[in-house]
Amino acid sequence: MELKWETLSMEKQQEYRDIFSGTPERSAHYTFASLWGWAAICAYEWAWDGPLAWIRASLPSRLAMAPVGDWDAVDWGVALPERWPSGTVFRDVPEGLVHRWEQALSGRIRVEPSRGEWEYVHRVEDLVALRGNRFRTKAQKLRRFVETYRPEFVPVGPGTLPEVREFQEKWCRVRSCGSEKALEEENRAIAATLRDWDRLRGLFGAALRVEGRMVAYTLAEPLDGETVVIRFEKGCPDFRDVYQAMNQLFLERSCGSFTRVNREEDMGDPGMREAKMSYRPERFVEKATVTLF
């Protein structure tokens, strides 16, 4: 069966979201808002296939990804070889789908863990309370920031979006985003997300102001009924401990209905990994690269 590929469209957002909601193990990488934000950078396309939606990227090169949808409604021993030629390499395949493929295609796939793409999952309660020795330093930084700066907490919405855009532009100038590919691409994804904020369902966020000046913001979305994804988070380097404060205050004041928070992957960056591990993840959404033979 040949898959029919289409460019992502806002018109099919709900159709995709409905299929994604039936995915047994949901990765933050595959939400509609995530794909839409990065669409211009990765040239994402999708193909509709009964209970599934397949995803692929065309930039910087053609890249097959995992499908979303009801994985258990598919006979993988037949469906995968029927749709994809031998030698196809799939990136960002969640562990739950890897296990299904291994059972159905024993000896016909090679699996390589993609540690840099594992998503960090934490208990919201842990990152709000910051109890015990393992979070002592985080709690001290939060207390110091709040006592020093007395921040104002404001939701992100139509009235604050222009301020968030301006903050992001300034942040990028300070960090010289134009000279670092990863930061430049992320900035484009943030700009696309903010541009289409009103059309991307489920997004919410908050910002911190100090004496009327925005010093940090967070953009997020629900992954499912119990997990919130931190999509983007930026803080002004002039304000010590601003990231610790933004993280804790947002979860405390805006995420009370969630029990888990997914803080996405570290992309293999040692500094980012150290920072993410310092929040003591409860578990990971593990992903792998899978080659079909």
Image (cartoon, grey):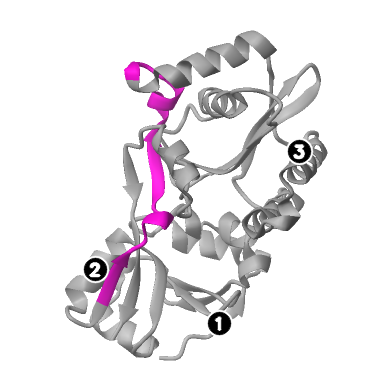
Q: Quadrant of the N terminus?
A: bottom left
Residue 164 badge: 3
Residue 15 left/right relative to 191: left
Q: Locate residue 265, reporting x and y percent.
A: 46, 50
The residue closer to the viewer here, 185 or 174, is 174
Query: Which quarter of the picture shows residue 210?
Result: top right
Front tag of 2 and 3: 3
Residue 174 left/right relative to 250: right
Going by the numbered disc 3, the residue's amino acid type is: Val
Q: Residue at x 36, y 87 (%)?
A: 87
Task: Tell me, yes or no, if residue 51 can be seen here.
Answer: no
Q: Quadrant of the C terminus?
A: bottom left
Label 3 residue SS: helix
Front tag of 3 and 1: 3
Q: Locate residue 220, reporting x and y percent.
A: 57, 41
Q: In this picture, is 33 found above or below 282?
A: below
**Is 267 part of what is drawn in magenta?**
no
Q: In this picture, is 69 found above or below 137?
A: below
Q: Mark 2 — residue?
A: 100
Q: In this picture, is 179 found above or below 236?
A: below
Going by the numbered disc 2, the residue's amino acid type is: Arg
Label 1 residue SS: loop
Magenta-tinted stretch: 110-133
Q: Residue at x 55, y 82 (%)?
A: 5
Residue 5 badge: 1
Residue 135 left/right relative to 253: left
Q: Locate residue 23, reporting x and y percent.
A: 38, 59
Assess disc 3: are there few (<14), some (14-19) or many (≥20) residues with their C-alpha within 10 Å of its C-alpha.
many
**Is 116 part of what is drawn in magenta?**
yes
Residue 175 left/right relative to 72: right
The residues bearing labels 2 and 3 have C-alpha atoms spaced at a distance of 42 Å
Going by the numbered disc 1, the residue's amino acid type is: Trp
